Image (cartoon, coloured by chain):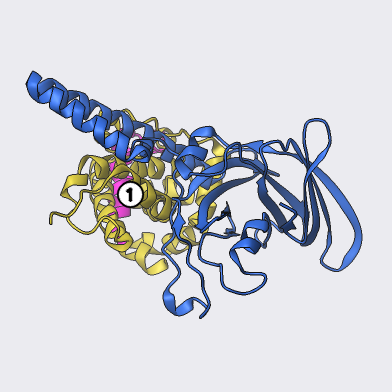
Amino acid sequence: MARPHLDQQQLAAAYERDAQRLLVWLTRRTYDAQQAVDLVAETYARAWESRRRFKADPADADALAAWTFGIARHVLGDALRKGRSERAAVARLGVETPALAPDEVARLEELAELGTLRAALAVALEDLSPEQRDAVRLRVVDELGYPAIAARLGISEDAARARVSRGLRTLAGALEGAR
Amino acid sequence: MSGRAPERVLGDLGDALQRAWAADAARGRRALRVRLPRVHRRGLVAAVAVALALVPTAVATRDAFWAPDPPPLPDALRPRDALPPGAAGTPVYVGIGEQAGIAWRLSATTCRYGRVQAVGLFLTVPGGGAGARCDVAARRPGASPEALAARRIQTYYDPVSAKTWAFGTLPAQARSVLVTSHGYDGGAATTTRVDARPVDPHAVQQGHLPAGLRVFVVALDGGRDVPRVEAADASGSVVLQCVNGRCDR
C-alpha cells in the first residue's frame, strides 16, 4: 500500500516540535535573529512545497525533523552564499513573516546564547582574512547593522553582507566547536 | 522588555505558515477542479460529499487549532492496572495568552472511558509545561476515569519564571473564577479572581470537547498550593467547587 503523503497537520505538528530548535540553530549561524526568523519561514515554506517528496513515514518525528533540517541547511547555505535571505518560497506562498522589535531580537539572541558564541568567535576571528575579519567583527562583536558596517568599511551594503556571510561560513568550524 | 517572547514569535510565524499552507492547498484544489472535465467534476463532488459525510472532522484540519500530539506513553511505563481510554480526541489549543509578560498556551484532549468523559489539559510556557493527556487512568481510587474527569484543576510551578500556574476546565455557564492559594510553607491564603475564558467553538468541535467548554489560567507569584477553586456564573452563583484539584462535578 502506498505511504500517505505528508499533510498539513503533520507538518504543523513538526513545526511545533522543531521550530524553536531550528530557530536557535539558524540564529547561531547567522548572528541575525530577524534573518533566522526569515530562514525558518523559508524552510517551512519550502517543506510545504516539497511535501510530496518526503518519502519516510510522516508519523516518524525524527525522520521529519532530519528532512526539515536538511532543507534548512540548503536555505542557510543559499543565504550565506548570496549574503541575503532567500525568500522565494515565502513569497510564492504569501507567508507574512513576523518583523522583530529590538527587544524581541534581544530575547532571541539570549535564547540562542549568542553572548557565549561571541566570545568564542572573537578568538577564532584571527583565522580570517583581514577584510572578512573586519566585517565579521563589526557585525558579530560590535553588533553593528549592515548599513553601518558598509559605511565604516566604505563598501556597499550588499558587499558588507557578502563579507560577513563568507566570514561566518569560514568560521563554521569555530561555531560548531563552541556549541 | 515588552516584546513577544521567542515562543510567541514562532507561534505567530506558525499561524502565518498555516494560513499560507491552507490557502495554497485551496488554490491547488481549485486548479484541480478547473482541469477536470464536467462529468468527472460531478463525480468528484459526489465523492467529496460522501467523504464529508463519513469523516466530518477531516475538513477541520485546515484550521490552526491542532496542538502537538505527544506519543503515547510506552506500555513499559504504564501501571499494571492502566486503563486506556476507549477513544481519545486529537489535542487542540483551547487558549493562548500572556500573563506577567509570559506567553502561555493551553491544549486539551478529550478522553472517553465508556460513559465517562474526561478532558486532559496541558499548559505550555517558555520554561516548560505540565498537565495531562489520556494516559493516566488506572483501576484504582484516585486514578479511575471518574477521578480523572473530576480532576479539572491542575497546577505547575515553573522554575524559570518562579510562578505557579493554576489552570483548569470549567462548565459552560462559568464566567469568573476565584483561586485560593497559599505559599508552600503555609502562610495566609490569598484569593485571585480571573475570567472564565470561552474556548473557540471550532476548537471545541475539532477536539470533540464538551459544548461551551471554558478554561482559566492564572500565574501566581512564587511556589504556591492551590487548595480551592470556585467558579461562578454571571449572577455570581457558584457553579463549580474544587478542593485540591478535585471538583464536585
Percent x, y of residue B22: 32, 32
Q: Is residue B201 visible?
A: yes
Percent x, y of residue A74: 23, 49
Say which amino acid is labelled 1.
Gln
Percent x, y of residue A97: 40, 33
In the image, the chain rendered in blue is B
Q: Is residue B30 above or below residue A165?
A: above
Front residue of this view, candidates A162 and B223: B223
Identify the main secondary structure in magenta.
helix
Q: Is residue B17 visible?
A: no
Question: Mark 1: which secondary structure?
Answer: helix
Drawn colour of chain A? yellow
Q: Is residue B137 above or below residue B230?
A: below
- In terms of image quadrants, where is residue A158? top left
Instruction: Check the residue under mark 1 and report the chain it is in.
Output: A
User: Which residue is labeled 1 in the image?
Assistant: A10
- In terms of image quadrants, where is residue B153? bottom right
Q: Is residue B222 left or right of residue A167?
A: right
